[in-house]
């Protein structure tokens, strides 16, 4: 196929008057502005993103013998992987390590609802429990500056049995208050203590007498989250 410059030269070699040359040259001119093509590729990209046939495979989707609950959960995560860049479904229970003098290290299939209503999907999140972080609800290391010394003991007993089945958990950040959770959560620590609950409130002001759970101390101390 002739390029523009070649086509131009070719036309100029043909015997014709100036008016005819100009008209013919305009007729074969290649538009240097690639906008139509860009638009087309943009449309194709959008079509690709919306293609209902395009599936994001998750670890469980090829595993036989999944329960209905597990399949529904897998579908839930697959949808979020596709549309919102969510993490993949982990075949692990939701667990939080109450660290010695540090944050809550949460692992699982997590939906974190921030105070402003924004929703974050994650497989791992490190939540401040000293009250001093400048990036609440996550830890930014300020517990070291503040010399937060709580060893992370867990004094409450389990309300339900632990389970290895994967499930999802939703945590909600309460303004000037704790982080509440709904969904099976196993809390554990360095002392091999554990507590399994389906719902509860996690202290993030650092003042609760029943850490890692909230006892309402944030109201007494005037804790502010923002
Ligand atoms: S626990 Fe790390 S900043 Fe609060």
Image (cartoon, rainbow, N blue to C red):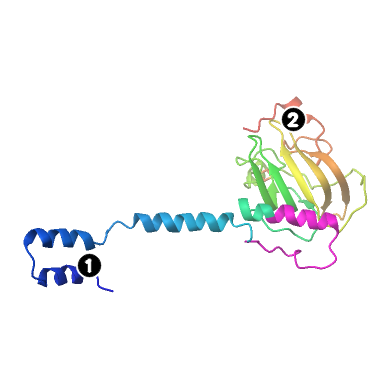
Going by the picture, which residue comes out furthest to the left? Answer: 17
Q: In 3D space, how far apart are the residues under numbered discs 2 and 1 (Cα atoms)?
A: 73 Å
Q: Position of residue 112 (x, y in %)?
A: 70, 44
Q: Residue at x 22, y 67 (%)?
A: 4
Q: CB of residue at label 1: within 8 Å of ligand 1? A: no
Q: Name which quarter of the figure residue 33 lies in.
A: bottom left
Q: Position of residue 99 (x, y in %)?
A: 76, 51
Q: Nearer the viewer, residue 16 or 113?
A: 16
Q: From the image, tell me which residue sits under label 1.
A: 4
Q: Is residue 189 left or right of residue 225?
A: right
Are discs 2 and 1 less than 8 Å apart at CB?
A: no
Location of the C terminus by quadrant is top right
Residue 81, compared with residue 176, is above or below; it is: below
Q: Nearer the viewer, mark 2 or mark 1?
A: 1
Residue 54, compared with residue 157, is above or below; it is: below
Q: Position of residue 141 (x, y in %)?
A: 63, 47
Q: In which quadrant of this rendering is ligand 1 seen?
A: top right
* Secondary structure of the residue carrying numbered label 1: helix
Quick one: label 2, few (<14), some, or many (20+) residues within 10 Å?
many
Q: From the image, tell me which residue sits under label 2.
A: 218
Q: Is residue 160 highlighted in magenta?
A: no
Q: Using the rendered image of the protein, determine whether residue 85 is visible from the camera's viewpoint.
A: no
């Amino acid at each position: 196929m002739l390029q523009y410059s070649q086509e131009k030269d070719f036309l100029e070699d043909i015997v014709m008057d100036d008016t005819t040359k100009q008209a013919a040259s305009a007729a074969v001119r290649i538009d240097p502005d690639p906008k139509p093509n860009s638009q087309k590729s943009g449309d194709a990209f959008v079509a690709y993103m919306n293609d209902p046939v395009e599936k994001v495979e998750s670890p469980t989707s090829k595993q036989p013998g999944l329960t209905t609950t597990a399949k529904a959960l897998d579908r839930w995560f697959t949808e979020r992987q596709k549309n919102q860049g969510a993490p993949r479904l982990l075949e692990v229970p939701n667990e939080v390590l109450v660290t010695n003098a540090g944050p809550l290290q949460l692992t699982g299939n997590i939906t974190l609802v921030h105070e402003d209503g924004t929703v974050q999907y994650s497989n791992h999140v490190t939540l401040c429990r000293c009250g001093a972080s400048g990036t609440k609800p996550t830890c930014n290391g300020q517990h070291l500056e503040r010399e937060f010394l709580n060893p992370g003991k867990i004094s409450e007993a389990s309300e339900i049995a632990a389970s290895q089945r994967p499930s999802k958990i939703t945590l909600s950040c309460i303004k000037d208050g704790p982080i509440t959770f709904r969904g099976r959560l196993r809390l554990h620590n360095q002392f091999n203590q554990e507590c399994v609950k389906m719902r509860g409130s996690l202290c993030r002001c650092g003042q609760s007498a029943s850490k890692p759970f909230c006892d309402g101390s944030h109201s007494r101390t005037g804790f502010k989250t923002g």
